[in-house]
Image (tube, rainbow, N blue to C red):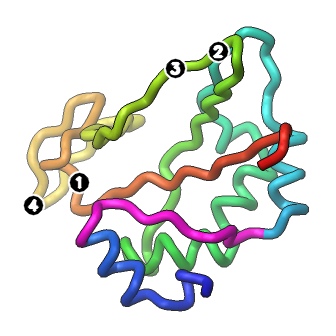
Amino acid sequence: MVLADRPNIVTARIERDGWISTDPVVDSALLDAVIAELPVVPGAAGARNILAESDAVRALARAPGVRALAECILGAECFVVRGILFDKTPAANWKVIWHQDLSIAVRERRDAPGFGACPPHCSPACLPCACTSMTALSTTGP
């Protein structure tokens, strides 16, 4: 079952658990293109700004399956804010326990009716709704 086709299930699981895991919602050719375009910096644990630097990452963000899941949660007007690569390898690895990110970076402050003052990193009070999507890529197999 593709959960993007079942918005009520997606919404219910997000409301119940705060997260959801799905079967793949994009084809392997797009994921291969993303892997091919990602920056490789030996010893680095990742890269910022990959959304701005990669056509394939932008295509992944616009992929119908990804959009369908995001729209189940955020509505049709949602959009991607940023892309970050975490490259966990045996040489660059770290434990990440469950956590909830409570801020996002913004380019500039803008006043808007109904929202409080926002510093360079907006707090949840500044955000009507946000979510994080993670795509797990592996060049070493399942």
Taking the spot 28% from the left edge, 64% from the top edge, the residue there is 17
**Proximity of marks 3 and 4: CB atoms separated by less than 8 Å:** no
Nearest the viewer among 13 and 119 is: 13
At label 1, the amino acid type is: Leu
Residue 95 lies, with reference to residue 131, above or below; the image says above
Crowding at dot 1, Cα within 10 Å, few <14 / some 14-19 / many 20+, comes out as: some
Crowding at dot 3, Cα within 10 Å, few <14 / some 14-19 / many 20+, comes out as: few
Of labels 2 and 4, earlier in sequence is 2
Nearest the viewer among 64 and 44 is: 44
Residue 49, horizontal then vertical, whole percent: 61, 33
Of labels 3 and 4, earlier in sequence is 3
In the rendered image, the residue lying farthest to the front is 142
Q: Secondary structure at mark 4?
A: loop
Checking the image for residue 92, the label placed there is: 2
**Residue bounds of the magenta highlight:** 16-26
Checking the image for residue 82, the label placed there is: none
Specify the principal SS of the magenta part.
Answer: loop
Of labels 4 and 1, earlier in sequence is 4
Residue 19 painted magenta: yes
Q: Which residue is mark 4?
A: 114
Q: Secondary structure at mark 3?
A: loop
- Residue 110 is left or right of residue 57, and the answer is left
